[in-house]
Amino acid sequence: MSDEDGLIGAIEAGGTKFVLGLARADGELIDTHRLPTTTPDETFAAMTSWLRAAADRHGRIAALGVASFGPLRTDRSASDWGTITTTPKPHWSGASFARALGPFGVPLAIDTDVTGAALGEWLGGAGAGRGTVVYTTVGTGIGTGVISGGRPLAGSGHYEAGHIRPARGAGDDWPGICPYHGDCLEGLASGPAIMARWEHDLSAGSAQEIGLIADYLAEMHAALVLLHMPDIAILGGGVAKAPGLIEAVRAKTRAKLAGYVESWDTDLGAHIVPPALGDLAGLAGAVELGRQALCESAA
């Protein structure tokens, strides 16, 4: 695939800002733009206006890739494919990327922001050259994306690993804050859960507090290892930056696996790692989603 086949438009849609890009067929970004996330009508209008103006400057857009906050309908057979569903962000439930971008008339791929970040890290970050990559972000919520052979894995919808209910720590009977499940991972270990429980974020946490959150995140990582046998697990998001957290997650994951998975019964410093691309991963993943959509349309 070459530039003669057209350019790839990419959208990383976040709760506070949209990052837009136009890339060559090899993934090289040639133009980028940021805009605030306001209402769907305003944000989508600004998004499509910039994409059309960028195409006027650089050349025809041949495909589009979106990596968006969710929850998101990712089942292509669904009538509301590409729609944000039950988000707590005001006005955005029912907002449809498929409708907003449909008039471009080009192949379109839509997935979650964490899957986009996972794909970006697989391409050129901490997961580069690995067969199966698991990426988990722990921040306002907890989300996971899985990349295998360069392709996002999903069933009828995207992963909801943040809503797994972990085994509770000894003596921990705090109810959690998830409105659906109470003490699921997101209800216990997300940024808002930590703040609700201790009235400070984990960067100011005690060793005991960091250990408890690490234990819950290790429950998830052990489950992901047993389900997917990944080559590497990337742990990102604001909560994951707390001093000592990733190291504690490594140790507790190894203990929970109890030697059963030989490849994960070594120093997990090479297996559970922070992201390498930072804020660049999501847009890089959105570009790759668009590139894959273009290749599939030509097959």
Image (tube, grey):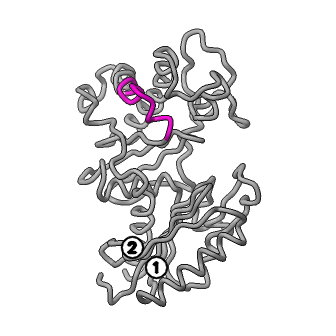
Q: Position of residue 18 (x, y in %)?
A: 56, 64
- Magenta: main secondary structure equals helix
Residue 196 found in image quarter: top right
Q: Residue at x 37, y 76 (%)?
A: 30
Of 82 and 40, the residue lying toward us: 40
Numbered badge on residue 63: 1
Q: Is residue 25 magenta?
A: no
Point 61% across, 84% down: residue? 103
Is residue 179 placed above or below 14 in the rendered structure?
above
Image position of 120 (left or right of 205): left
Where does the image place residue 245, in percent across and percent down from the top left? 42, 27
Q: Residue furthest top?
A: 171
Q: On screen, 97 above or below 261?
A: below
Residue wearing tag 2: 291
> Where's residue 160, x and y in %?
56, 44
**How much space separates mark 2 and mark 1, taking CA atoms?**
7 Å
Compared with 170, 197 (above or below) is: below
Please tell me which residue lies in front, 293 or 103: 103
Q: Secondary structure at mark 1?
A: strand
Whether tag 2 and tag 1 are in contact, CB under 8 A, the answer is yes
- Quadrant location of the N terminus in the rendered image: bottom left
Element type where label 2 sits in the image: helix
Q: The disc labelled 2 sits on which kind of residue?
A: Arg
Magenta region: which residues? 238-249
Residue in front for this viewpoint, 46 or 298: 46
Callout 1 amino acid: Ala
